[in-house]
Each structure stands twice: as C-alpha cells, then as structure tokens.
Image (cartoon, grey):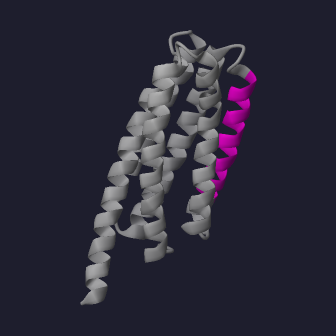
Amino acid sequence: METISLDSTRSLRNLYFVRTAFQVVWAAVVITTAMRQPLLAAVLFFLYPLWDVACTIYDLNTSSRSGSARTSQIINALLGVGAALGIGLTVFHQPIYAVAVFGLWAFGAGLLQLVLGLIRRRQLGGGQWAMILSGAQSMIAGVAYFLGGLWDKRHIKDVGGYATFGALYFLIGGILLTRKLSKSTTLEAN
C-alpha cells in the first residue's frame, strides 16, 4: 500500500481548510438568495459540483499518484462533470429535477469519498474518520435529495445545509491532519 508523503499530507490538509471556507460561504449565499434571487442560486447550484471537480483535480495532482485512490478520484471528477451538466440542463427550467440530479451526484460522490477515506486511513495510519463519516452522510443525503427532488419536496436552498455539514467534516479532517503533521514533525526532529 502506497503511503502519502508529508508534503502531500500538508497539501491535503490545506485543501480541507480551503474547502471548509468555500463551502461555508457558498452555503450562506445559497441559503440567503435562493428565494429572493433564484437565478443566482441556480448558477451557484450548477457551480457546486464543478468546485468539487476542481478540488478533486488538485488532490489528484498533489496526493494520489496511483492505485485505487486515484481511480476513485478520477471517477469522482467524471461524476461531478456529469452532475454539473445534468444540473445545468434542468436548473433553469425544472429546479426540482436539478435537486434530484444533485441527489444522484451526492450519493455517488459520497460513496467514492467513503472509499477514498478508507484507503487514506490505511495510507496515513488514521485521521480520516471525518471523511469516512462525511461520505456515508453524503450517500444518505443523496437519497433524500433525489427522492425529494422527484416529489417536489426539496429546494435548492436545502442544499446549503448539505454544504455546511460538508464544511464541518472538512474542518475536522484538516484539524486531524494538522495534529498528524505535528506529531510527524516532532518525531522527525527527535
């Protein structure tokens, strides 16, 4: 099993903190604008999976050199592009279907995040429980958004909560990696 270098771990930690900040801001804007400015919320909704794709590509370039972690991330990036296309085709005409598409993406991305978290747990020697839990919760939320979108029970503003929980998990993941890096640096110094 390939291990992740300290530089890659630092990069991953930084990515988690950037994702935390972005998702908090994104969620706040979507929640506050969805009812008053639905066009802006629709554009933000379309951009959300593309943001995830950009983060995945960054992560691919800094952490996952080979193996099943890399494969999982490539599939996740392709899934995110497909979700953005599906949302883009539906969000301006049938927003409830865009929410259903988002649900499918959240389920698939959550499954892949769960797998990646388990792989990285072995590579890093722990510190990925927040990402594993986030993946599982994303899968559950994905089912709820898919069904809610099909039955007109969910709205774009509801996805703000999804992003907020994701931000919390990324924050915890970043803190755990900071602790792991601190311990590694201490061990190297001794």
Residue closest to the eye, 37 or 57: 37
Q: Left or right? Give the position of 7 relative to 70.
A: left
**64 with respect to 130 (left or right):** right
Q: Is residue 179 left or right of residue 170?
A: left
Does residue 137 appear in the picture of this structure?
no
Let me know if residue 77 is in the magenta part.
Answer: yes
Look at the image and say whether residue 90 sits in the magenta stretch: no
Please give the range of residues in magenta: 71-89
Viewer can see residue 84: yes
In the depicted view, which residue is nearer to us: 52 or 140?
52
Q: Quadrant of residue 168?
A: top left
Please state which of residues 116 and 179 is positioned toward the viewer in this rendering.
179
Residue at 42% across / 61% down in the picture?
A: 13
Q: x and y percent of residue 95 in the render? A: 64, 16
Q: Quadrant of the C terminus?
A: bottom left
Identity of the residue drawn at 47% across and 62% down: 12
Q: Is residue 108 above or below residue 149?
A: below
Secondary structure that dominates the magenta span: helix
Residue 160: % across, % down: 46, 28
**Image coordinates for residue 94, horizontal then vertical, percent:** 68, 13
Q: Position of residue 124 (x, y in %)?
A: 39, 68
- The answer to whether 108 is drawn above or below residue 158 in the figure is below
Q: How many marks?
A: 0
From what the image shows, is residue 176 above or below residue 1?
A: above
Q: Nearer the viewer, residue 27 or 154?
A: 27
Q: Residue extending furthest top?
A: 152
In the displayed structure, 19 sits above or below 100; it is below
The residue sitting at 64% across, 19% down in the picture is 39
